[in-house]
Every structure is written in structure tokens, then in C-alpha cells.
Amino acid sequence: MKNITVLISGNGTNLQAIIDNVKAGKINGKIVAVISNKADAFGLERAKKADIPTYFIGHKGITREEHEQKIIDILEKEKVDLVVLAGYMRVLTSLFVGKYKNRLINIHPALLPAFPGTDGYGDTWNYGCKVGGCTVHFVDEGVDTGPIIIQRANEIREDDTLETFKQRGLDIEHQALPEAVKLFCDDKLKIEGRKVKIEK
Ligand code: GAR
């Protein structure tokens, strides 16, 4: 069974999807910690409700590396196998990425390599795309550039608003992210260069 940590900055609906899948026995892992860089992230409440240890690690007044080291200290204590970024809105430095290489995954709200950055849904919508979606990928040193594990499309309808497009997108994320976590925990993911092979 793998030890999973989830890093969040906000509402934590993706965290909730992982919690629910772990509870349902669909993921061969245990969430050992939920860490937020925002004190008021609602995801911390979701974790507490599920009896998962929570940590708020603020980043004000310290360097990025000092902030990341505080998180690493927790991860080492908890003997973490997989780190999941689920709406974690800080770019990580090579200190963190190097340490958790091939064990660090992120969910991004666009079909990468289109629209990296902080507003995947807004950028997809404003560009006038007919299809958006989400990407779960391993994290490397770049911004949203690591090897892709899963992508799911979300067709934009004539009667969509940004809000309805986003809501449907989040529902799709809640399927895609637990699926990727499950595959990782089952040792089904093999990274070959830029490609991630999913073993049967
Ligand atoms: C999700 O849409 C996730 O893909 C996005 O933030 C939202 C978090 O929602 N992540 C990024 O944009 C990362 N660059 P949640 O807190 O309800 O899971």
C-alpha cells in the first residue's frame, strides 16, 4: 500500500475525489497527510472530516526553498511514496521536483501543452476553443511540462458559459485524477522519455 500526500491551495474537490476513492477501496493507498499553503483552504476541512492529518505551511517571508523544505520534512516523516498536487497553486523549484521525481503528479485544467499556468479553463474559454479538458502529468522542472499520464476532453457546447464549462471540467477531473493515482499505486505507470506507458 502506498503512502499518499496531497498538496492543496483551495476548495479541494479533487482531494475529495481521492478521499472518496480511497474510502471505497478503489485505490491501493492511504492518504497520510494533506498540506496547504493557504490557512483558509476548504480542502483542509475535507481532510479533517476524513481523519487525515492536515498541515498549513505558509510561505510569507521565507524563500521558496525554505517553504519547500518544511513540506519535505513532513513528507520524509510520513515516508511518502506519492505526492499529488490537487489545485496546489505554487510553482515548485528543482529542490522539491528533484527529490520527488517520478513520484510527483499534478492535475491541470487544460489539454496540455495548450494553456499551461494558473487559469487553464479561462484561457481555453477565452481562446474560443471547441474542446478543452484536463491533464494529469508527472511534474518536471518546467511549468506544466512533465510526461502526460491521462488526458480527458471536455467539448464546449454552444449554450455553455465559462461556469458550466468549468463545472463539467471539474467533474471530469474528479474521474481522471483518482484514476491516475490508482494506476500509480498499482505500479502500472512506466515513464519512457516523454511517454508514460500504462501497463495492463
Ligand atoms: C482544479 O481545476 C485544478 O485542475 C486546478 O485548480 C482547480 C482546483 O480545484 N489546478 C491548477 O490550475 C494548477 N495549475 P479543487 O481545489 O476544487 O480541487
Image (spheres, rainbow, N blue to C red):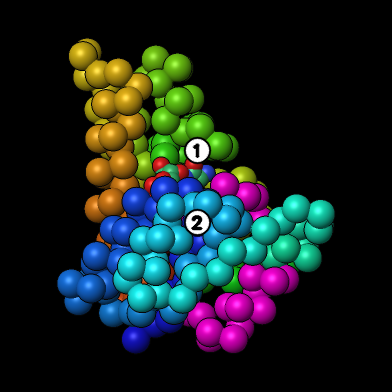
Give above or below for 189 relative to 61: below
8 relative position to 175: left or right = right
Q: Residue at x 45, y 17 (%)?
A: 127
| Residue designated by label 2 | 8
**Which amino acid type is shown beneath numbered disc 1?**
Pro
Query: Does the beta carbon at disc 2 come under 8 Å from ligand 1?
Result: yes
Q: CA distance from mark 1 to mark 2?
A: 22 Å
Three-letter residue code for mark 2: Ile
Q: Nearer the viewer, residue 12 or 64?
A: 12
- On-image quarter of the N terminus: bottom left
Q: Which residues are magenta?
A: 69-93
Residue under numbered circle 1: 113
Q: How packed is label 2: few (under 14 Cα within 10 Å), some, or many (20 or more)? A: many
- The spot of residue 84 in percent (x, y) is 46, 63
> Where residue 131 sits: x, y (%)?
31, 26
* Residue 177 against residue 152 in the figure, above or below: below
SS at circle 1: loop
Residue 155 in percent (x, y) is at: 25, 27
